Amino acid sequence: MVLHNSQSSVYRDDNHKPEMALALTEFEALLGFISVKELMDVLCSVPEIVELIGSGNAKQFLLVNEQDRDKNAKAVLQSIFSQLVLASRDKIGAMISNIKSRLLLEMQKRKLTDKEQLVLRLESQCPADAGVIAAFLLSYVKLNHGEALYLGGNEPHAYICGEYIECMANSDNVVRAGLTSKHRDIQTLLSMLKYTQGFPEILRGVSLNPYTTRYLPPLDEFEIDLSILPQATSVVFPSVPGPSLFLFIKGKGAITAGISENDNVEEGEVLFVPAHTEIRITAESTELHLYRAGVNSRFFTIP
């Protein structure tokens, strides 16, 4: 609402934008800020970031007792991230060049960490971009098919590689700061971030029946069902008070709504189902994969 009121030509929606990403393939993302321990490791192993913030500030954070370190971690992280994304393009370019040269030398002596390998990949795609270095400060997540991430509002994220289903609240607002050629609004992003630290939860859903898994985010707007049907098997989606969208991504099947005759569905089709409509789907190919997005069922059970 605040962004819409202040910059309606850029942020056209007045609603928030939490979202869920559900992996179709192996999927990689950066989501949220690293833990206090990981931040300490970065300050010990990434000299380019230490140079950016000053060695004195880094040592001060590393040498304080554990209780004070945890208390100050958010402020330190906020300071590092702000200095990084606000640095000039020339300064960022020089930092990335130094990081790349150092890592290419070190990989001849040791195996690079997953995060270091990711930084080199990002550099090849987005040279001289602050997001390449910012990756050191964000949690690196790898998902398998059927695993999901929930992204709350005001949390930094970047989808790196892989295919996924995305569902979000009713907003198309995006505040960007790096790893993109689109409009960037760095000051707005810095003002809105929560700087929550720690590895994000990987959601694996809850089984509704032998063929269907449900993914429930902690908000009322939406839920996602994933159904994988072997040939000749059926699944019933019961009547619910809200509408649903069905996306068929693999195979062929037959669908019955209420007392109507069967209609055929196949890969690539999208189906809108009104509220209070029961749906039965039967697989006619070796496997039928489909996703359903609807209003979160908790919304209808609130007293």
Image: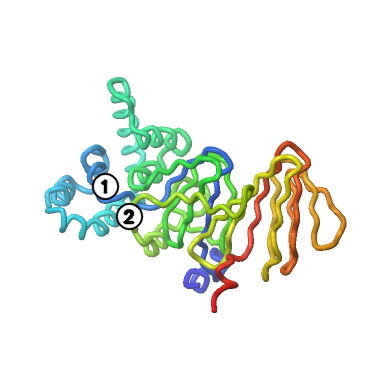
Q: Amino acid at mark 1?
A: Leu
Task: Say left or right for 123 vs 66.
Answer: right
Q: Which element carries disc 1, helix, strand or loop? A: helix
Residue at the disc numbered 1: 39
Q: Nearer the viewer, residue 208 or 124?
A: 208
| Residue 83 percent coordinates (x, y) | 30, 52
As drawn, the residue found furthest toward the right would be 261
Count of numbered badges drawn on the protein: 2
The answer to whether 252 is drawn above or below residue 105 in the figure is: below
| Mark carried by residue 91 | none
Residue under the image location 34 percent in, 31 percent down? 100
Residue under the image location 58 percent in, 63 percent down? 222
The answer to whether 215 is drawn above or below residue 302 in the figure is: above
Which image quadrant for residue 189? Answer: bottom left
Which image quadrant for residue 164? Answer: top right
Residue under the image location 42 percent in, 50 percent down? 31
| Mark carried by residue 197 | 2
| Labels 2 & 1 near each other (Cβ < 8 A) | yes
Q: Which element carries disc 2, helix, strand or loop? A: loop
Q: Residues within 10 Å of mark 1 (few under 14, many from 20)?
A: many
| Residue 205 percent coordinates (x, y) | 52, 52
From mark 2 to mark 1, how far is it between C-alphas? 10 Å
